[in-house]
Image (cartoon, rainbow, N blue to C red):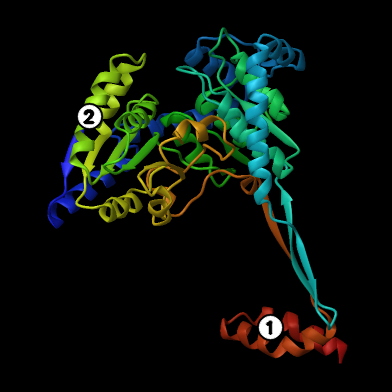
Amino acid sequence: MKVFEITSPEQLDRVKMFLAQSADRAQNDGADTDRRKAVEAIIQDVRARGDAALVDYTKRFDGVSLETDQLELTEEDMKKAAAAVPKATIAMLERAHENIRTFHSKNLRESWEESLPDGSMYGQRITPIEIAGVYVPGGKAYYPSSVLMNIVPARVAGVKTIVMASPPSYHGSIHPSVLAAARLAGVSRVFRVGGVQAIAALAYGTETVPSVVKITGPGNAYVTAAKAMVRGVVDIDSEAGPSEVLVIADKNANPNHAAAELLAQAEHDEEALCLLFTPSKNLAEMVLERLRERMARLSRIAIISKSLEAFGAIVITPDMETAIELANFVAPEHLSVQTEYATRVADKVLNAGAIMLGSMTPVAVGDYYAGPNHILPTMRRARYSSPLSAEDFRKTTNIMQYSKERLMRDSHDIEELAMLEGLQAHAESVTVRIRDVR
């Protein structure tokens, strides 16, 4: 893990350069061009051959032979999968589901209209999208939490049809806990299709898979590239990069807790960005010591070691204000504030996907259970984008109705603005109405 100590403006600039390069790590991948070519070829093949291409790629990439009528799981398949999950796990999923549902129900906008004295009206109509697609990765691990985080907000928003796709990486199907979470959250249809081919199928449709209007959910670099390529045909949540955590800690922080957050994020994948900003050199040394001690006991030590070596850093800052400045610069996916006055520090951080306040709020509570969504902006996108919410599955339509009196009053200004822009037909669309009423 790299250690920087900022003692001059020049060192601060070097740290910012390292942080910017690390945050953009997925975009700086030397294999990006070859990956995009491979992704584009698969997308075009799925568009051309539909279900046949899905069957071929499932055999090639997942090692599972399916007929086209086996791509979609039946209701009976879903029931059997849910029955195979321990009742205690189902109860846990139900509690997490309720927390997520409650949280996402609190920030829904409502349609509105305003009638004016002259009989005119304007307003906005808020409606859910008609059909959403959810991608759930599989392979190294299984993610029922991601199922809930994607499907529950869509259901809260009022989406009628929610289609889920996930690779058949568990004995030729999808892990029972994932299917149980999907059934609990209210999924409409489930397909055992993964990777780029799943994104292409959701975007363009096949004989079996319906085309959707929005695709959400995490995935590997190939899935992320595929989502980027189909954006415009459909909407997507984001082009998610590898996981990120930033811990801001002061001299009073518990080094065990700070180290635990870095390790928890590092075990996601080899490109996870794990940072500690602290004004305390003593705390930095203790956290390094705890990392070395705890790593050896963790099952994913190989992944953690690579992540911390390549993208792990401790930055010793001259003061807390510099730590906050750097936090706003890097705009982390997850921010853990472990300081004496955590709220005061967090109030000054404007750029972060999610903020966990205090030593007793591990990132894991947001990942799994508390209710806020764990699908968050990465790669410094928290400077301008937000976590996934129910509002992301809704759209706004503007509504207006002019009365005769209001059009006559405003016609001159509208005609003048249209002519100012050189759009005579626009102006005449108003003029002809004024002539008719006179």
Tag 1 secondary structure = helix
Tell me the kind of residue under disc 2: Leu
Q: Residues within 10 Å of mark 2 (few under 14, many from 20)?
A: some
Judge by depth and name the residue closer to the eye, 320 or 244: 320
Tell me the kind of residue under disc 1: Ala
At horizontal 34% and vertical 40% (from top left) the residue drawn is 247
Relative to 152, is 20 on the left or the right? left
Numbered label attached to residue 101:
none
The answer to whether residue 135 is above or below residue 229 is above
At horizontal 82% and vertical 89% (from top left) the residue drawn is 435
In percent of width and height, residue 56 lies at 55, 16
Count of numbered circles on the image: 2
Q: Which residue is mark 2?
A: 288
At horizontal 57% and vertical 85% (from top left) the residue drawn is 420
Classify residue 295 by image quadrant.
top left
Which numbered disc, 2 or 1, marks the residue closer to the eye?
2
Judge by depth and name the residue closer to the eye, 156 or 48: 156
Classify residue 379 by image quadrant.
top left
Relative to 352, is 373 on the left or the right? right
Q: Which residue is mark 1?
A: 427
The answer to whether residue 46 is above or below residue 100 is above
At horizontal 51% and vertical 32% (from top left) the residue drawn is 365
In percent of width and height, residue 90 lies at 67, 18
